[in-house]
Every structure is written in C-alpha cells, then in structure tokens.
C-alpha cells in the first residue's frame, strides 16, 4: 500500500513538473517575439513597450505608463540584474530563473524581481489601443464553452481583479485544457502553478493610482472593455 502511495506521489510530482515545464515552454514561445525575454549571456534588457506610451490613453494615461514602464518595470529589471550578477542564474532565461527560485525563502528577492519583470512584459502584451470588444471567433467559441458567455468571462475576470486584496494580478489561464480566471498576490505568477497564462491585469496601485486614485474597479472595468488584446490571448492559447 505504501508503495502504491509512493508511486502516486511520484507520478503527481512528475506530472506537476511536466505541467510547469509545459506552461513555461508555452510562455517562452508566447513571449519569444519580445527582445530581452530570450536571455543569453549578459544582463537582461527591459523589453520595449509594444506601443507608444500614449497609445492606451485615456484609459491608461501616458503619465501612468511613463512611471509604470519606465520606473517600475525598469526597476525590476535593474534589481534582478544586480541580484543575479555572478550567480548560477546570471545566464538563464527569465522563465527558468522564476521556476528555479520559486518557493525558496532565501531567493525571494530574485523571485519577486524576476516574476515582476515577466508579469509586466506579459501585461503590456495583454493590452492594445482600441482593444476590448469581441474576441476572434475561435476564441469566442472557447470562451462560450468554458464560461457560458463573454459577459460571464469578463465578470469572473473583474471579480478576480477587484477581489485581490492588496497588490497582485488577475489572470485568464488555460488549466487542463479549460479557460479559467485566477488571481495572484504580489509578484506571484501562474508560471509556477502548472497553468498557461493567457492574459493578465496588473492591480498593483502603481498601475492605476495616478489616473483612478483608489477606484480600482473603474480601472479594471475600463481596461477590460477598451484595452484587452484578445488577439494576443488567442495567440497565447496556441
Ligand atoms: Fe505593475
């Protein structure tokens, strides 16, 4: 009996590791188009924004993007480069650094900065000017099948984004072939949970405070209706 339990446990771990590897692999491919994500020798670069700093206005002002991308996102890149210089992580791809240090208390600073670099790059990709609206037909079909309707999907995503207590992220992910929403605290990322990230919404106060002050719900609602890049979600779905 013990042997069986042990086998099941081993299988479970193997399967989880496989799922994490699959999610990381898919995410690496999804992010492959962005310079700076494929980290070779030398310091990590801040990936370029996929649009101009004023492209998302008035939903997200160029002032907010200037601070959010130019100070916060850049800050995580700079911190991470300092933390990994001369270590075994220095030349690893970003996704591998995240998975390697996840859950290790003595590597929390590396995890937090690495995950924040990845989450932000993924966030910028999740948005576009004149976004929102109807997803492409094949994605809409999948959303209808898994959530019942686009409205139900948006409602769940809104719920995840507004109910995350304190800093964090709301996500649309693929979990076992099914679309789901989830939320993560601080720098936590679905990359370490064995699910494939498809879309994220940054709900740290720095993402909206200059434009919306404490009205997170207004920021989330405007972002979902006007900025979601459904084409990027479809691409990430693969
Ligand atoms: Fe942020």
Image (spheres, rainbow, N blue to C red):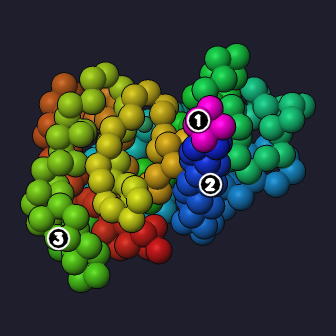
Query: How far apart in space, not on screen, are marks 1 and 2 (Cα)?
Result: 25 Å
Give percent across and percent down for residue 71: 52, 34
Q: Residue furthest top?
A: 106
Q: Which SS class for mark 3?
A: helix
User: Mark 1 or 2, which is nearer the eye?
Assistant: 1
Q: Quadrant of ligand 1?
A: top left
Find the magenta span and give its range: 1-6
Residue identified by numbered label 3? 144
Q: Residue furthest bottom?
A: 137
Q: Is residue 13 visible?
A: no
Decide which of tag 1 and tag 2 comes sooner along the chain: 1
Quadrant of the drawing holding the N terminus: top right
User: Mark 3 or 1, which is nearer the eye?
Assistant: 1
Q: Quadrant of residue 182?
A: top left
Residue identified by numbered label 1? 1
Which residue is pictured at 30% across the width and 54% down the height?
A: 180
């Amino acid at each position: 009996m013990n042997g069986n339990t042990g086998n099941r446990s081993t299988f479970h771990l193997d399967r989880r590791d496989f799922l994490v590897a699959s999610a990381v692999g898919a995410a690496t491919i999804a992010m492959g188009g962005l310079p700076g994500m494929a980290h070779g020798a030398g310091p990590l670069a801040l990936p370029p924004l996929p649009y101009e700093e004023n492209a998302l206005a008035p939903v997200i002002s160029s002032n907010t993007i200037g601070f959010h991308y130019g100070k916060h996102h850049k800050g995580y890149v700079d911190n991470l480069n300092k933390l990994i210089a001369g270590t075994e992580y220095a030349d690893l791809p970003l996704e591998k650094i995240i998975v390697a240090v996840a859950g290790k208390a003595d590597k929390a600073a590396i995890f937090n900065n690495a995950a924040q670099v990845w989450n932000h790059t993924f966030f910028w990709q999740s948005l576009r000017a004149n976004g929102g609206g109807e997803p492409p037909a094949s994605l809409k079909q999948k959303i209808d099948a898994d959530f019942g309707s686009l409205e139900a999907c948006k409602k769940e995503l809104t719920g995840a984004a507004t109910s995350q207590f304190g800093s964090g992220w709301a996500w649309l992910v693929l979990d076992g072939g099914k679309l789901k929403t989830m939320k993560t605290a601080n720098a936590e990322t679905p990359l370490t949970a064995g699910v494939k990230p498809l879309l994220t919404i940054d709900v740290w106060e720095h993402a909206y405070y200059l434009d919306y002050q404490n009205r997170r719900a207004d920021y989330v609602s405007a972002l979902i209706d006007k900025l979601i890049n459904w084409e990027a979600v479809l691409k990430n779905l693969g």
